[in-house]
Image: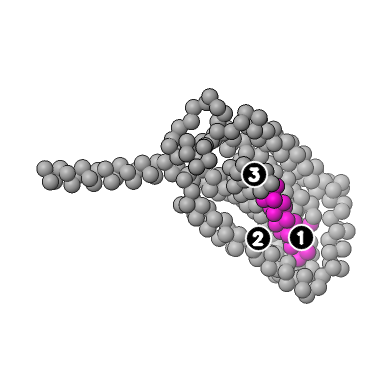
């Protein structure tokens, strides 16, 4: 009997751990107003249209060397005249933060901490997927367009002879800040907090773009294309997240943790 009881206890512990693991990776569901769900789908469509139109316009101008890309050289030359030791130090710091070493570490830490601390890992997984999607898309376009960077002797933080269009630094910053802001504030009922959250994301994006242009590594249209691609990725995240998690009253919702979140607990 004692052996059976011990075996039963072990089985229950294993079942409990499996249940906790299962609940962690069950997609969170939440109740929203029908108008709010329609608004999310509408926002995703607008972002997709704007992002696609902006990217196509930028790509065509770069390939044909006209249109938006006409402003690249004048803006680049003007930024050369604004350089100073103090500003350069700030821009190098920003370049490191949004660079290929620091930003992935920051993203990884955020995803791991968020994933372990949250009731569900759905949103951290979405953020990781968005970041990975941005990297893949960026690398594909880089090798298709093969645009040259500004002159090497004008770069202030080491020479970079890789392709320029689009900017991977800017795309990574945009994806992290925009998608992160959406995934956080879409679960808040305070519109003011959401506004401030996206304003903060916008400021971060502007700083990332400014550092890449100021330090001489990209043309303005490189950054513009990255922003446009990020809008497309954000649109995809909103669509997938809304389709998979947003439920209106009357629709079924599953999972204890999902029910708890849907009531704001």
- Crowding around mark 1 (Cα neighbors within 10 Å: few <14, some 14 to 19, many 20+) is many
> Looking at the picture, how far across and down is residue 138, in whole percent?
66, 50
Is the residue marked by circle 2 packed among few (<14), some (14-19), or many (20+) residues within 10 Å?
A: many
Label number found at residue 98: 2
| Image coordinates for residue 66, horizontal then vertical, percent | 87, 47
Q: Earlier in the sequence, mark 2 or mark 3?
A: 2
Q: Which residues are magenta?
A: 194-219
Residue 180 within the magenta-colored segment of the rendering: no
* Residue position marked by numbered label 1 in the rendering: 210
Farthest top residue?
250
Picture layout, residue 250 above or below residue 7: above
Residue 57, image x and y in percent? Answer: 80, 42
Alpha-carbon distance for marks 3 and 1? 31 Å
Front residue of 102 and 251: 251
Q: CA distance from mark 2 to mark 3?
A: 29 Å
Q: Position of residue 49 (x, y in %)?
A: 74, 36
- Residue in the picture at 59% in, 47% down: 184
Q: Kindly state the secondary structure of the residue where label 2 is placed.
A: loop
């Amino acid at each position: 009997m004692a052996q059976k009881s011990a075996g039963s206890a072990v089985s229950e512990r294993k079942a409990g751990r499996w249940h906790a693991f299962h609940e962690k990776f069950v997609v969170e569901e939440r109740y929203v107003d029908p108008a709010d769900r329609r608004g999310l789908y509408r926002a995703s469509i607008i972002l997709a249209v704007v992002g696609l139109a902006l990217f196509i316009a930028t790509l065509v101008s770069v390939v044909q060397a006209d249109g938006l890309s006409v402003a690249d050289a004048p803006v680049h030359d003007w930024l050369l005249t604004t350089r100073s030791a103090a500003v350069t130090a700030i821009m190098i710091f920003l370049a490191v933060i949004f660079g290929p070493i620091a930003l992935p570490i920051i993203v990884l830490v955020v995803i791991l901490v968020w994933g372990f601390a949250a009731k569900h890992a759905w949103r951290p997984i979405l953020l990781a997927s968005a970041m990975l999607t941005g990297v893949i898309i960026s690398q594909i376009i880089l090798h298709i367009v093969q645009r040259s960077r500004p002159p090497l002797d004008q770069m202030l933080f080491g020479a970079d002879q890789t392709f320029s269009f689009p900017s991977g630094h800017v795309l990574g910053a945009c994806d992290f800040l925009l998608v992160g802001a959406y995934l956080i504030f879409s679960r808040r009922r305070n519109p003011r907090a959401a506004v401030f959250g996206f304003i903060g994301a916008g400021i971060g994006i502007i700083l990332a773009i400014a550092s890449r242009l100021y330090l001489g590594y990209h043309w303005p249209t490189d950054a513009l294309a990255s922003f446009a691609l990020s809008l497309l990725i954000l649109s995809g995240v909103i669509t997938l997240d809304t389709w998979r998690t947003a439920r209106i009253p009357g629709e079924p919702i599953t999972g204890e943790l999902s029910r708890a979140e849907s009531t704001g607990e």
